[in-house]
Amino acid sequence: MDINRLLGLRIKRIRKELGMSQEELAEKADMNVANIRQIEAMRGNPTMESVAKLARAFQIRPMDLLNFDCEYRKLEFYEDPEQALRDLIAPLKPEEQAEIISLVAMVVSTMR
């Protein structure tokens, strides 16, 4: 199976998992709905810019969108990035959680 077919199927599956219409995805990704339809129908060659826009709309990394090994890995989708961080560190001890939060704060401060 070629990569465009795999990508089209993956985008369609993720969109449906999120309960989004093609129109909603197009709006969130700042793309034309005709482009979404073409990609899902495996008739187009999406650019890396399109892949990045779609990943952003799905709130996942582009590399996760291109990971076609979906049988082994269920994607987690978060409306709230803070909730994603809380869920990731929840199993840790309080002192480990504090250390992670401190590291994240340090990384964020270097990005400003």
Image (cartoon, rainbow, N blue to C red):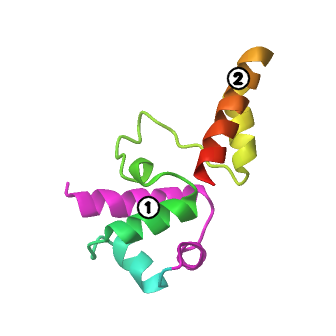
Distance CA(mark 2)–CA(mark 1)? 36 Å
Residue sitting at 70 percent across and 27 percent down? 89
Q: Which mark is residue 67?
A: none
Mark 2 residue element = helix
Question: Seen from this angle, which residue lies furthest right?
Answer: 94
Report which quarter residue 91 is drawn in: top right
Q: Residue at x 53, y 52 (%)?
A: 60
- Nearer the observer, 100 or 11: 100
Task: Identify which residue, 87 or 96, lies in the foreground.
Answer: 96
Q: Looking at the picture, does residue 93 appear above or below residue 109?
A: above
| 94 left or right of 12 in image | right
Q: Position of residue 94 (x, y in %)?
A: 80, 17
Pick the quarter of the image with the C terminus.
Answer: bottom right
Residue 91 visible here = no
**Residue 87 percent coordinates (x, y):** 71, 33
In x, y percent, where is residue 40? Answer: 38, 70
Residue at image coords 72%, 31%:
101
Tell me, for residue 11, which label it has, or none.
Answer: 1
Instruction: Give the residue type at disc 2.
Output: Glu
Bounds of the magenta segment = 1-30
**Residue at mark 2:** 99
Q: Which marked residue is nearer to the observer: mark 2 or mark 1? A: 2
Task: Please say whether residue 59 is one of the residues in the magenta stretch.
Answer: no
Q: Nearer the viewer, residue 69 or 102?
A: 102
Name which residue lies at 27% across and 76% down. 43
Q: Is residue 2 above or below residue 89?
A: below
